[in-house]
């Protein structure tokens, strides 16, 4: 029973680590999209009007 506990905890921490990596990637993507929108929206508005 004792060796199974650290393995379970390690697996849980690894899952949390994967989730954290995904969150970081999502935040970077969101930041990039926001920067692109801020950069391109004025150009689009200028083209339209």
Image: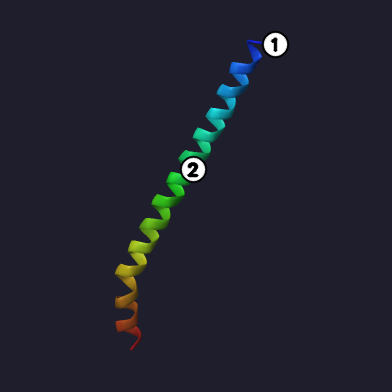
Residue occupying image coordinates x 48% and y 40%: 20
Residue occupying image coordinates x 34% and y 74%: 41
Real-space Cα separation, disc 2 to disc 1, in angstroms: 32 Å
- Name the residue nearer the viewer: 35 or 49: 35
Locate residue 38 relative to residue 12 in the image: left or right: left
* Quadrant of res 39: bottom left
Locate residue 29, reporting x and y percent.
41, 53
What colour scheme was applied to this rendering of the protein? rainbow
**Residue that badge 2 annotates:** 22
Q: Residues within 10 Å of mark 2 (few under 14, many from 20)?
A: few
Locate residue 7 relative to residue 35 in the image: left or right: right
Judged from this view, the residue extending furthest toward the right is 1
Q: How many numbered callouts?
A: 2
The vertical placement of 19 against 10, above or below, is: below
**Residue that badge 1 annotates:** 1
Q: Quadrant of the N terminus?
A: top right
Locate residue 15, reporting x and y percent.
56, 32
Locate residue 45, reporting x and y percent.
34, 82
Contact flag, marks 2 and 1 (Cβ < 8 Å):
no
Residue occupying image coordinates x 54% and y 35%: 16
């Amino acid at each position: 029973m004792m060796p199974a506990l650290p393995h379970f905890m390690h697996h849980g921490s690894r899952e949390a680590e994967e989730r954290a990596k995904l969150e970081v990637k999502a935040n970077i993507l969101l930041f990039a999209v926001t920067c692109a929108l801020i950069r391109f929206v004025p150009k689009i508005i200028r083209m339209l009007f």
